[in-house]
Amino acid sequence: MDFDRSQWSGENCSAKRTLEIVGEKWTFLVLREAYYGARRFEQFHAGIGCARNLLTDRLNTLVEHGLLQRSPYQEPGARQRNEYRLTEAGIDLFPALVALMQWGDRWVADPEGPAVEITHRDCGQLVKADLRCSANHTGLTARDTVPRPGPGARRAG
């Protein structure tokens, strides 16, 4: 069945909904730092370098949407603060970061090469984002795929 895009609404598109949460560059950089091990505000700030109020806003957004979880902590003699830990939903976005980095390393890389390489902890080899279908065919590209209405598709109009 051909997918006539004009017949279907894009209002409930999963990509659109996801980008409404993480589509702003600072938000994805906060997630990057969380994947790299940042937990505390100052760690995020040092890794990203954005304005503090902007970082606070992005952390709040990620908590509100369930990608990070706040956990209070208190150093001796200091006031209570929060750590931010990835939730299952936040961890599930990691392949998207790897795909963005992989694309960037290919198309907009620094002449000297990648600033960071993500490797498999067990074998040390580079991690790659690869598309595969549910029958386990690997190495798919956009040319190998076709869209079709899913169970949540809504007619336009």
Image: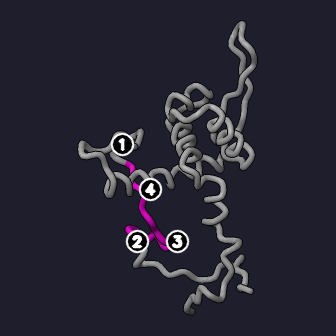
Q: Which residue is mark 4?
A: 99
**Label 3: how many residues lie within 10 Å, few (<14), some (14-19) or many (20+)?**
few
Above or below residue 74? Residue 66 is: below
**Three-letter residue code for mark 1:** Glu
Q: Which residue is mark 1?
A: 117
In the picture, measured across the screen, residue 138 lies left or right of residue 66, that is left
Q: Earlier in the sequence, mark 3 or mark 1?
A: 1
Quarter location, residue 7: bottom right
Q: Nearer the viewer, mark 3 or mark 1?
A: 1
CB under 8 Å between callouts 4 and 2?
A: no
Q: Earlier in the sequence, mark 2 or mark 1?
A: 1
Q: Which residue is mark 2?
A: 140
In which quadrant is the N terminus drawn? bottom right
| Cα distance in 3D space between marks 3 and 1 | 28 Å
**Three-letter residue code for mark 2:** Leu
| Cα distance in 3D space between marks 2 and 1 | 22 Å
User: Residues in magenta?
Assistant: 127-141
| Cα distance in 3D space between marks 4 and 2 | 13 Å
| Cα distance in 3D space between marks 4 and 1 | 12 Å
Q: Is residue 130 magenta?
A: yes
Q: Nearer the viewer, mark 3 or mark 4?
A: 4
Question: Which residue: 45% across, 66% down?
Answer: 131
Q: Which residue is mark 3?
A: 134
Secondary element under disc 3, as helix, strand or loop, is: loop
| Cα distance in 3D space between marks 2 and 3 | 12 Å
